[in-house]
Amino acid sequence: MSNMNNTSVSQRSAQNGSLPFWKNQHTRRVIGDVVSHIFLAIMAVIWLLPIVWVVLESFNKNTAPYQETFFPREYTLDNYIQLFTERDVMNFPRMFMNTLIVAIFVCLISLFFVLAVAFCMSRLRFRGRRTFMNIALILGMFPSIMAVIAIYFILKAFGLTSGALVLVALIVVYSAGSGAGFYVMKGYMDTIPKSLDEAAYLDGCTTWQVFTMIIIPICKPMIVYQAIVGFLAPWLDFVMAKVIARTQDNFTVALGLWQMLQKEYINQWYARFAAGAVCVSIPIAILFIIMQRYYEESMSGSVKG
Amino acid sequence: MTTAIAKTPRRVRKRATDPDGLQPSPYSTAKAWRNGDVITRLSFFIFGLGNLLRKQIIKGLIFLAVEIGAIAYLATSGEQYLLKLPSLGSAEQTKVKVDGFWVYQAGDNSVQILLYGVMAIFVIILLVIVATLSGRSAYKAQSVIAEGDKPVSIFKDVRSLTNHNAHVGLMFLPTLGIVIFTILPLVFMISMAFTSYDQNHVVLFDWVGLKNFGAIFSSTGEVNAGLFISVLIWTLVWAFFATFLNFFFGMFMAMIINRKTTHFKGFWRACFSMSIAVPQFVSLLVMHTMLQRDGAINRLLMGWGLIDGPLPFLTDATWARVTVIIINLWVGIPYTIMQITGILQNVPAELYEAAELDGASWWQRFTNVTMPYIFFVMTPYLITTFTGNVNNFNVIYLLTNGSPTPVGASAGKTDLLITWLYKLTVDRSNYNLGAVIGIMTFVVLSVVALITYRNSGSYKNEEGFR
């Protein structure tokens, strides 16, 4: 509607004005609008096409990866049914549960670690604080892949590499080092006015009370962001999982999906891979929609006014 | 703020003034040693002695228990590995005839010796740290008694963990996690760079000094100067394009969406955010199959009659490199749009109003207001993205796996340092060379990033926005 209004206004002014049309503000704005909307539409198609393709592929009757046409010809629900019922070759529901358990624990532990470290780095002043921040920076420069093998040996030394303990190992590995990733949270806490803490200390609050009753409630948007990041890590990582989980019982979803694309499976499993991918994407998409709301809030600073 | 804390410092600072403006502790290690009485000085060797004699029984017992535990570990299992650490073991597996049967006797395992040796060294460092803590604690008790007060009870000490010493309580577990699962593995891997742990020495290997670093600068071999330089250059080129193309295209699109007259802003943002919801490895694996010779994209283009034969997306070196960068744009731009949208909404409106009053054109407002603001906020982000791209394992490994690989070479044309490292260690078991590549990656990154980061506003002036 407003688009049409714009055009009519610009037409009127073009008729009335004596300027050539390319110097007319309204005409230029309309052209700009049209061009940018077309541009956005093309870009949106490019971004959505692969996703639409995965969704349609998950209903494909042909299970092999290659076919004559771009989109599938015949559609069926069998892929989803098989994915959840045929458990002897690859136990997708089990993998899903594994990942869910790991993700919940990692989310809680890493959230606490990040909050604790960020609070100490941002609100407290003590000796060794700068040293800790510099060490965290330097550690971030080492390629993480480098330590994967060593972490496996260490877990082996602790006896965490067999049976159900592998899940414990995964939880430990994903959450143990998370304290070093405090920078984003610290940056957010840095924007909270110091006077809030000072007022609380004057009223007799302990540091722990300031942490739990003042800082944490203010950081809520960032906490949601951090919690989702922690929750997503086990769903997305497959390098670490591949080294640690060596038997199919302990596979996470990422490993299972990766396995489906290996040479011996791909021809039977490609459509089911797509179905699995859709199943994984749905919870992530929901979380992401929640996150985006909080994320935009958190970008606009902690305390207003 | 209550920063006049008693037993905080974990290490002695030579500098008298701390950058945060803290006073040096009145109970530092040096002072404890200099001014302490016999009991205090003895506490450096018999942990907790000073506390035990000065009625801080529980605290003293904890110190003592730590000492006994650590020494017991070192005496029972740590010692043998420590002693073998210089040689990394030499006993090979042997066969012995016991009651007429051949029985294998396990020889030395160098990996195990190295790992447990490094762990034992960590325990020794822990012991030294606890020694200073014990000495300082004893000195504190001594001076409190000298002033005529009662020594602090254990309950007060525990309660101070929620108040004056909150950082000790809060940081303990995260730091422990970082030490065990980040620093320990790194030290272990770095030390591998100085050994001969490769596919020919899987069980027993030796220290070889800097020989592996020499391999990088040699002209032949699995890892050689030519290959290393070409991988390094491609890594830097990739990281540069991946970071800055992402940034500028993302900014461009965010600004188009953010134009005043653009309709359905939420819809466009949702379109681009959809690709974040699909796990990265899924979309990358799908792209991988779509871009194959017989993949969906080639079929689509051939079906439209745009091309006669399949395009070599991932099989020709130049094509593959460009494809990888473009696919990375697809992966990365939605994140940039999200970031920049947030920042754009935060640009102080007064700046624009002032600029408009001064008669600035759209372009002038963009270059003089928007860009400086975005750069100011985004510099740390750009640096971390650059670092992240140098270490961007997923995109390369899942999309091309480094191919096309020339026959006989250990790295392909699209291999980054990090995927090369992965191939050398996981696929080829050349742990020493992998570790060397890892260290070189670190050197490159720290040169690029540390300088820029230390000069960035958010590091220098962290309280600037309070």
Image: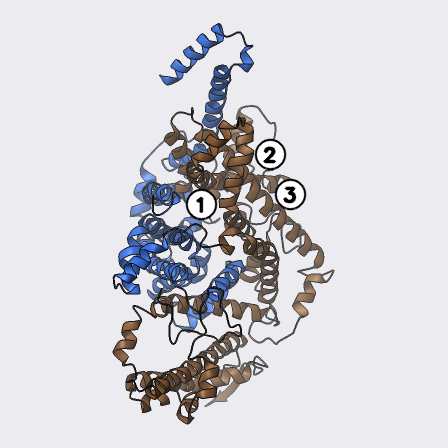
**In front here: B244 or B238?**
B244
On screen, residue A248 above or below B252: below
Helix, strand or loop status at disc 1 = helix
Vertical placement of residue A63 versus B122, above or below? above
In-image side of B203 versus B409 (left or right): left
- Mark 1 and mark 2: span between their CA atoms? 24 Å
Q: Residue B402, percent across and down?
A: 58, 49
Whether residue A246 can be seen here = no
How far from the left and from the top, in percent, is residue B66?
37, 83
Residue named by callout 3: B317
Q: Which chain is blue?
A: A
> Which chain's residue wears label 3?
B
From the image, state the color of chain B. brown
Mark 1 against mark 2, which lies toward the viewer?
Answer: 1
Q: Which disc number belongs to residue B8?
A: none
- Is B7 displayed left or right of A263 in the figure? left
Which disc is residue B280 wearing?
A: 1
Whichever of labels 1 and 2 marks the residue nearer the N terminus, that label is: 1
For the residues tagged 1 and 2, is the chain the same?
yes
B406 or A202: nearer the eye?
A202
Instruction: Measure the alpha-carbon separation of dots 3 and 2.
Output: 12 Å
Q: Identify the image quadrant of residue A51.
A: top left
Q: Earlier in the sequence, mark 3 or mark 2?
A: 2
User: Can you see residue B163?
Assistant: yes
The residue that label 2 is drawn on is B311
